[in-house]
Image (cartoon, helix red, strand yellow):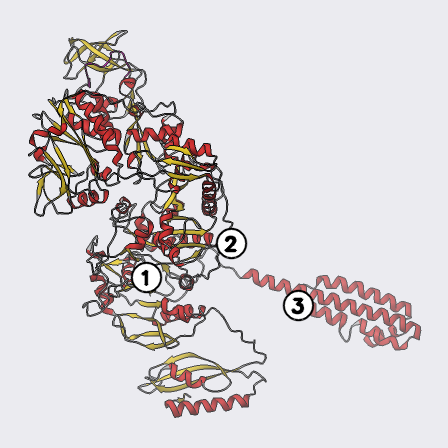
Amino acid sequence: MKVSLKWLKEYVDTDLSPAEIANRLTMAGNEVKAIQIIGENWGEKIVIGQIEEVKPHPNADRLRLVRVNLGKEERTVVCGAPNLNVGDKVVFAFTGAELKDGHTGEKVVLKSAKIRGVESAGMICSEMELGISDEHQVIMVLPQDAPVGMTLLEYMGDTILDLDITPNRADCLSVIGIAREVAALTGKVVREPEIKYIEKGSSISEWINIEIFAPDLCPRYSASLIHNVRIKPSPRWMQERLVAAGMRPINNIVDISNYVMLEYGQPLHTFDYDKLRGRKIIVRRAQSGESIVSLDGIERKLTPDMLVIADAERAVAVAGVMGGANSEVTDQTTSILLEAANFNAASIRRTGGLLNIASEARYRFERGISPGLTIPALRRATQLIAELGEGEVARGYLDIYPGQAKSEPIVISSEKVKRFLGVEFSQSEILSSLTSLGFECKVISDTDVEAKVPYWRNDIHVEEDLIEEVARVQGYDKIPVTLLASPIPSRNPDPLLKLKQSVREVLASSGFTEILTFSMVGLDMLKKLSPDMGSVEPPPVRIANPMTADMEYLRTSLRANVLSAFAMNRRFEEGSIRIFEAGKVYLPAGKRQPEERETICGVMGGQLFAGYWQESERMMDFYDAKGTAETVLERLGLSPQFALSHDPGLHPNKQAEIIIDSRKAGIIGEVHPKVLAAFEIEEPVYLIEFDLNCLVSLVSYRKAYQPVPRFPSITRDIAIIIDRNITHQKVKETIQGFPLVEMVEIFDMYMGEQVPPGKKSLAYHIRYRAQDHTLTDEEVNQIQENILQKLNADLGAVLRR
Amino acid sequence: MGREKVCLKTIKTGEEMLNQLDKIKSEAVVDLEHATDTGALEAWRVKYLGKKSELNQVLRSLASLSIEEKKAIGAAANSLKDYLENIFKAREKAIKEAQIVAAALKETIDVTLPGRRPPAGHLHPIAQTIQEICEIFSSMGFQIVDGPEVELEYYNFDALNIPEGHPARDNMSSFWIDITDESGKRPMLLRTHNTCVSARVLASQKPPIRAVSPGKVYRYEASNATHTPMFHQLDGVAVDRNITMADLKGTLYEFARRFFGENRKVRFRCDFFPFVEPGVEMAIDCAVCHGEGCRLCGNSGYIEILGAGMTHPEVLKKAGLDPEVYQSFAFGMGVERLPMLRYGIDDLRLFFGSDLRFLKQF
């Protein structure tokens, strides 16, 4: 909402600077986004002049010598503009005036100059030189009533406040609305326009009959009728204000309805009375199949949930959104039916949205304006049409008001104000705050005041609304700053959030960088995650109104985004890449809300010691991913098992489920080469995935204390030859089954020439310890021997010599 | 000759022997000063403390003395022996230390070569910011809570005093989930703000309540430097019998002080949100112009940080709380804005672009 300060000052007196007015409005809830000054640099040296004489330049064909009357003096300057006419009012700049260069637009200070031998002290200005527009071919010509000698600043200068009006304050989408705010915030009184006009002839009800068939969508419909109107351009002052507010002047009637809308905030509509059939206005829902050509010439298909204004035969306007071409006011129009109505906000919003029409009227109606506004705005516009359109107003006006509700006063108690705001305002402060905003107040007890809401406000319903009015007029700065004094509620932190934080921190300290990506993905991305690229099962949750196909579904896996990020970063990063994302996946749950599972997915690939100058380089492999998973789980106090698994998106032989207490808490593995190819990754990538919703039930942050051993340990090594298909885990479990074995650790695995085909060599450190004595060599030798026998009997292992 | 000497000395008097001890001492001290390496030190030890040392001869010849002399000279000789042993040990320690230092000095490296780092990753700047905010509110007794991102229309809008047709719904264009209920309506959407989590907290917990919920929110807005279809918000709510707007100001002021630092100006102005009344917008003075007005802050001198207010009585009623008994405040802030201001990031999309060259800066 753009408000001209000149216009505003017609309704409220203020000496405050534009910046201070803007500050007070902003603090009280109507934010001023920008202050635009028209004529900021004009000053005293740019004045209105009248051309007295135009003579040829003695030394140049295309230049003229122009004598300009400036009131107190006359000046003759050299000018080359093509539109120099004696008698025209023009803008004259003295030397020293600040202008913009007519070609480059840069700021210049006007100097006197000799042009082709003739001294020229001053200049007749184009709009571009004044900073008004880009027009620089012709000089600016002012209306004939422009007073000679007046500075342009006084004549045309203005300050425009650009306000951001919150959705609850449709009443502030008007100059008077803002004037009321300024008045309340500066201790002044609003001067509303005095509305007076003469009515003539027969009563309006003899000319037109109004019926509302849809009172739920049209709480009020008011109308007046003006005959013998002359359609012509509106006066300059009105045009200027419309332009300043960002609207285009059309003719006096259209301009008046726009002007009064800007003034009061009530949208108006004008019909050419003679085009209405059957002397009737019917406010009804559209019939199915009905259509209307709107003012912009487009045929609009209407549906029965849209409200229309109709005559006896057909729709003549889409209510509150746009008028119809069939009843449009044209240059030939003589009788105007003026409408000031109130429509249901939700209905206007829906209709405007369906028809895709954005209009100033819709903008106001869909915020919900007060039905109390129709009559003042109707009468004001009627007055202006009578004055500026030289029309004759039919007697009376029509006012159908099915939505009239009794507005009960609201009680505000100073005790509640204090309890709510934490600061005490006296009853007189409460009274003056509300009265300044137009509330009619009555003191009903020591603490209580009864306030009647002014007709233009429809955002005040409960005591808390009144408290806000008091607080914002008094100023939020008067509310003190205190810290919560009430007891801190005792509640346990969410274990899932704590777990997520722990895992993220371990991953980050293990070299993984966190990414955050959109939850919406394209189906093709999810398809790429399985090597057959087939359908995604279960089908992911779809967004009904996706923005693009690549954000049509809710992700069921983090893998697609993490792999895409890997591929993208590989373009810049040659060494190791380790990234992860912690976020939700959305698993469909029929008609219910999808199951949102907190998941962490990390991928890694490239050289392990990338870019280091001394280490020998080695590519990451499966065991680096596994080690990372083990580190994470160890930090959570968990002892996982890993078992070969069958996730189709991973390498068939290089993947393992993370199993804790027989539950699957995650997976690690090499990403399937076909999946990698689908993501245009040309190297092995290893993946770690944790299901945090599962992990959270397994994690116990409690740790059991083990006494520090009192007796020394003995460590022995053992190397065996064994079938290749027997896992390390089997060997390890067999060894661990023996008493006094404290720890088993593999330190070598070998397959090759030194061992028979189909066999492998495994070498272990075994650490023995007794809790109650120092072990002897004999004891350990015996166990070691027993272990070998058991490994041989159960697994066919033989000692490697 | 040697034997002769010994014979001669054996007949020395007690006084001569004492003089001899003094001489040994002074010679030993001087000699020791010249012993600067292990070899010289060993030679010194043999000379002064060895079996054939002069001192040892004195000790051995004590037998020939009278008891009184034996006592006196024996004590003097033993004391000299202790003394020599002590200065020997001290010298030995000093030489060893000097050797260690000399050896260390021979070892040289180029300290400007890069260090061998354990791989270090980076947490996302948004996640770091959320963590920081949560820590501040945790310390003020707020519980961190979470809620569904695919939210029911009821919690996202209706429970927050935003009924169907309310213009505030226009400002939060939504992604609707393609699932319809029996009446053909779509009851679910991607939450457009995190205030719906506060609505769930109000409906499910008993006062006193203090909770903040960080998380992802979604708006139907094409990506550009200042908009992305997904971003993060942190919403908070507190309920008790006597919570005031002054408490709201205090809580938010404390947050601003701890997040932005001590010397920033904080501004509270009236604003509108359907779920609060009175409504508040909190802003801090612009870090660039300090309140003077510049391009960054749109000449206002202040930068909006969050919206807040006293929870609307309708919202409390819908959650089953009696607004005559309980008072509540609520606030909500966009998270991305904070690291953008702090680090001067000018494009929102960077946060979601997964570019390690960006993410590794934090």
Which residue, given by chain and number where applicable, does mark 2 sit on?
A: A487
Residue B262 located left or right of residue B57: left
On screen, residue A310 above or below A634:
above
Which residue, given by chain and number where applicable, does mark 3 sit on?
A: B38
Residue A234 seen from this side? yes
Quadrant where the N terminus of chain B sits is bottom right
Mark 1 residue type? Lys
Mark nearer the viewer, 3 or 1: 1
**Quarter of the image where one finds residue A694:** bottom left
Residue B93 located left or right of residue A553: right
Stretch in magenta: A140-151
Residue A126 located left or right of residue B324: left
On screen, residue B135 above or below A307:
below
Around disc 1, counting alpha carbons within 10 Å, would you say few (fewer than 14), some (14 to 19), or many (20 or more)?
many
Residue name at image x 25 percent, y 33 percent: A373
Q: Nearer the viewer, residue B337 or A254?
A: A254
